[in-house]
Amino acid sequence: MKILIRDGDWWLGEQLASALGDDGHLTTVLPYSTVIGHDESTDTLVDGYDALVVLGYNNGPTDSTDPSEAIDRSTRQLYNLLNAASDAGAKRCIYISTLKLFSDYEENLTVTEKWRSLPPTDDAQLLATHLGEMVCREFARDRRIQVATIRLGFPLLQGDSAKAQASGESAAVAGVDAVEAIKRALTADSLAQWQDIHVQSQVENQRFLMHAAKELLGWT
């Protein structure tokens, strides 16, 4: 499989590219600085790729992004990317979102993938991530490309599950677990045209349920 990773020039993208390479896939990491227009350059950029991974929310460069730029990247530029990729024959997009979109719910509630997200209006990065989900969903509804949205827990930590457990955070996710979930979503056979998947590490008093990850990705 040939996979394009958008905004992958930070540690999660680098670990993902390395892991996919070890599995025999060909990957290209698209730097955060790349501006995606509605022109032939984007058509050329996505030509020949089977799948996309879009790091819509991350601990990397977007932390310092201007609010209007963050929203533009998650709406207009994401539309341009998906439009070109679907026209070029890409079959699947994995959009990386965050469970922070559900952080306003009380921790004792059993939040699943069927719950409505609560994007804050005073956090441009979270709002942009939510809007990115909506853009992806419309492409999936039009059956132009299959989309799996993986909402990662928080904080996102470099390391393995032991690092997440040691953090004491009920919604933590380790980088190793995040990479494994993305890898499985890229090759899973039973995903719907549009699929939400919640992923966090197994920690004490785990905050979020992971029904879809267990059923569709074989998560244990």
Image (tube, rainbow, N blue to C red):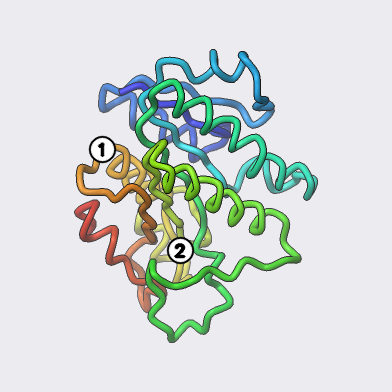
State left or right for residue 72 relative to residue 198. Answer: right
Which residue position holds label 2? Answer: 172
Which residue position holds label 1? Answer: 187
* Classed neighbour count for the residue bearing mark 1: other residues with Cα under 10 Å, few (<14), some (14–19), many (≥20): few
Q: Residue at x 42, y 54 (%)?
A: 174
Instruction: Give the camera-side residue of 143 and 41.
Output: 143
Q: Residue at x 55, y 53 (%)?
A: 134
State left or right for residue 106 relative to residue 75. Answer: left
Amino acid type of disc 2? Answer: Ala
State left or right for residue 93 relative to residue 154. Answer: left
Mark 2 → mark 1, Cα distance in angstroms = 25 Å
Instruction: Give the camera-side residue of 160 and 127.
Output: 127
Instruction: Give the camera-side residue of 189 and 123.
Output: 189
Give the x, y percent position of residue 130: 59, 57
Q: Is residue 198 above or below residue 33?
A: below
Q: Residue at x 33, y 29 (%)?
A: 20
Asked whether the beta carbons under mark 2 and mark 1 sit within 8 Å of each other, the answer is no
Q: Secondary structure at mark 2?
A: loop
Q: Secondary structure at mark 1?
A: helix
Give the x, y percent position of residue 58: 57, 47
